[in-house]
Image (cartoon, rainbow, N blue to C red):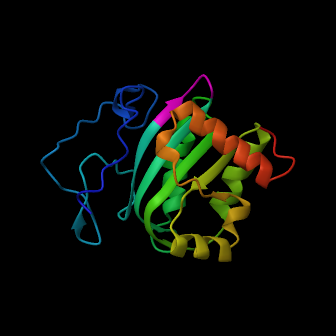
Amino acid sequence: MHTLEPFYNWQHIYCSEQDPNSPFHGRTYSEFEFSQTVYNYYIHPQWDEFGSRTLYLKVLMADYEERYIVIELLGEWNDALENDIMQLKREVLEKFMEQGILHFILIGENVLNFHFDGTDYYEEWKEELSERGGWAVCLNLSVSSSLEFQQAGLNRYLPLITLKDWRIYKPFHLFKKVGIVLAYSLPGADL
């Protein structure tokens, strides 16, 4: 797992540690000191912790003008034991919402497992975004995690989208592509 790095081809456009509006502003990273773990496996030091012991993230892009953000996730998304959605919403998502972000793309291809607990924070987040004309999606969640996600009915609040070639897009084009896919899959969506 220590070889799984966050996507870095957009760093010339955006770095969350240099963004004064980011909860990760001012963080410094080592390329050589591995201290964070998932399942007792060390992970690459570029991933950011936000209060979960099993789920980490990297903000790949935050565009305050276009009002969207792209966040890559790594680890175990565990709402049952860790209440990860609550931690993620309170410690990261709400901070960006306060800065005007309305559109959230969560990339979940490195989410190894998902464990369901309840819908409260998903419902709350969707309602807050819908009131402002926003949306959130989870992109490329693994097959096993997406099955549990769908069985819990969470895709009503956080739609699952598959877009395997997302890395070929520039951030704005990915945002537009996801918006189009979402509009076709959810008729009447206010984009």
- The front one of 108 and 36 is 108
Residue 54 falls left or right of residue 180: left
Q: Who is closer to the viewer here, 172 or 15?
A: 172
Residue at the left extreme, as displayed: 32
- Could you tell me which quadrant the C terminus lies in? top right
Which of these two is toward me, 180 or 136?
Answer: 180
Name the residue rendered at 78%, 41% in the picture: 131
Q: Mark yes or no: residue 96 visible.
A: yes
Residue 144, horizontal then vertical, whole percent? 52, 75
Tell me residue 125's x, y (percent). Answer: 66, 51
Q: Which residue is drawn at 68% across and 58% down?
A: 159
Residue 97: where, in percent of width, then height? Answer: 60, 36
Q: Is residue 147 above or below residue 65?
A: below
Asked if residue 117 shows in the view, the reply is no
- Work out whether 108 lies above or below 90: below
Residue 120, x across and y down, in percent: 67, 63
Q: Nearer the viewer, residue 47 or 89?
A: 47
Which contiguous range is marked in magenta?
61-66
In the image, is residue 118 part of the stretch drawn in magenta? no
Name which residue lies at 53% across and 49% down: 90
> Which of the 4 image quadrants contains residue 68?
top right
Q: In this view, does 39 lie above or below 9?
A: below
